[in-house]
Amino acid sequence: MTSLPPPPPPPPQGGPAGSPGLAKGDTMIEAKAATKWFGDLVAVSDVSFRIGAGVTALLGPNGAGKSTMLRMLSGQARPSRGEIHIVGGDPRTDPDVRRRIGIVPQQEAVFEALTALEFVTLSARLSELDDPTSAAIKALEIVELDTGDKRRLPTYSKGMRQRVKIAQCIVHEPDVVLLDEPLTGLDPRQRLAMVELFHTLGNDGMCVLISSHVLEEVERFGSNVLVIAKGRLAAQGDFHAIRALMSDRPLRVLVKAESARALAAALVANEAVLGVRLEDSATISVEAADGGAFGLAIAALAQQVGATLIEVRPLDDDLESVFKYLVNR
Amino acid sequence: MRLTRPRPPIKELYRLLWRMQITRGRLIGLGVLGSITILIALLGRGADDVNDAALGAVAGYGLGVVAAISAVWVATSTLGNLVEDGLLVYLWTKPTDRWLIPIAALAASLSVLAMVVLVPVSIAAAVTEVDGLVTATIAAVTLSLAAYSSLFVALGLAFRRALWWGLAYILIWENVIARVGSGTARFSILSYGQSIIARAADTEPRTGLRSSAASWIVPIVVTVAGMVFATRRLDRAEID
């Protein structure tokens, strides 16, 4: 486990409208030292976190333990050790908890004998909705599929089948939505629409946990991440904040300024700065030991040498940099 | 706030699993297998011992081959295919009571098997013109199909390649080992069904004659036990 601080409290957003027992900022998913092994192979080791409403990306390379973690959260797999709580209950044994979970599994298979409407209606019926057909039509409309399509699911494209899976997941308006690689097979326009949908669900108070190994995808989900590497929780929280806490790795910053040479000279003398490189007459790249101290120093130094700052931009606080750092340690 | 729980979705589960079983290839294959029983029964009408020939056609081939093999083919795949394709997750993670899943699977299997086994084997019994054989055949085939189906639905949940395990049970245990002695025959579902038919035909099967009560009770006990095992298996299973 990283030396990063313990997980922050869940974001202070409202619980789903009408959801019994949920108040603003409540923890909706909780893992307590969750561990899962298969024989000698430890897939997930001692993972603890809490998540509230909003969108969180579960990030990690292939084989890191993301799917096993999601299977434990959905109740499909029993933790070998530790505990999983979804909206306060056990998803394996408590039907009331299962009623409040929606799942998009990773596997592509769907019921070949059914149409999209039949599949989603079945999901609604199994979730014990009073009017499953109306709910299914609404869910299919949300994912932009034709509710009157009489074709069976095998005739659908991969992207259409993926959207059907998402529709069956949200048809009963669950409190917790668990999605394993949900954008697989979607074209760019559909991806954008689905990302918007996930944000809408999160803003409506659902807890949306999305597993992915595609960093570009994850950045679109927002900045809140759970990073799993080699079966362990490497970090949790806003990835910009995580980057700021990586004190053992210098922060790289691009500074654009008039009189950049004079500013570079002043920066060399500053104790928060480890290295300075003058890229051109107006651009400096800086390695800072302490991002906070550097942030405080740069304006004062610029004023001191009479340099006008044009741009100050971190070069490596994007998700990819944070991710590479965390999984390669 | 909802005061009453809605009706359990057994009908929807049944329809789903039934539709997954109905494939053209399967219906044709099993239909041909069942129809051969009628042909054998017709040929047996010219035999010296009509009752013995009727027993061979209906209890030997109809029950021992058609019913057993059709049941293993259909019932192991009812839930077994869902497990192998990763589709069980769409049923298992729902709030629905899990015992409904094997019950629906059993009902779906029996519906298919009624078409491809019960109908042709009962027609074969009628063709023999042995008094009382049709009623006994309907009872024996129904009880045996229920027991086989329940056992093989559970097997489909418990093992990958359940079809091969089921076939091994049918071919090796029921058709070889169970014929060695009455002790092993007691653990053969086939022997109980054959006993019901043999009584009607006033003859005795190779696996020995079970008591009248046992012939009815044991298949029912196996059916219930299969469903209990399948439900417990589902409750404890880890689902992909």
Image (cartoon, coloured by chain):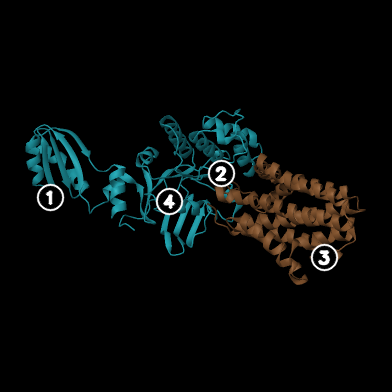
Chain colours: A cyan, B brown
- Dot in front, 4 or 3: 3
Q: Hey, what amino acid is under mark 3?
A: Ala
Residue B23, position in %: x, y?
Answer: 66, 41
Q: Is residue B23 in view from this perspective?
A: no
Q: CA distance from mark 4 to mark 3?
A: 53 Å
- Circle 4 residues within 10 Å: few <14, some 14–19, many ≥20: many
Do marks 2 and 4 share a chain? yes
- Residue A123, horizontal then vertical, whole percent: 60, 41
SS type, badge 1: loop
Pinpoint residue B122: horizontal percent, then vertical percent: 83, 48
The residue sitting at 49% across, 54% down in the picture is A72
Sequence-earlier tag: 1 or 4 = 4
Name the mark on residue B95. Answer: none
Foreground: disc 3 or disc 1: 3
Q: Residue at x 6, y 37 (%)?
A: A262
Chain for numbered disc 3: B
Instruction: Name the residue at 29% across, 53% down.
Output: A328
Image quarter (top left, top right, bottom left or bottom right) of the C terminus of chain A? bottom left
Q: Which residue is mark 3?
A: B214
As measured in the structure, the alpha-carbon distance from the residue carrying label 2 to the one carrying label 3 is: 54 Å
Q: Are marks 3 and 1 in contact (CB under 8 Å)?
A: no
User: Decide: marks 4, 3 in contact (CB < 8 A)?
Assistant: no
Q: Which residue is mark 2?
A: A19
Query: Which residue in the structure is indicated by mark 4?
Result: A66
Give the spatial CA distance, label 1 vs label 4. 41 Å
Q: Callout 3: helix, strand or loop?
A: helix
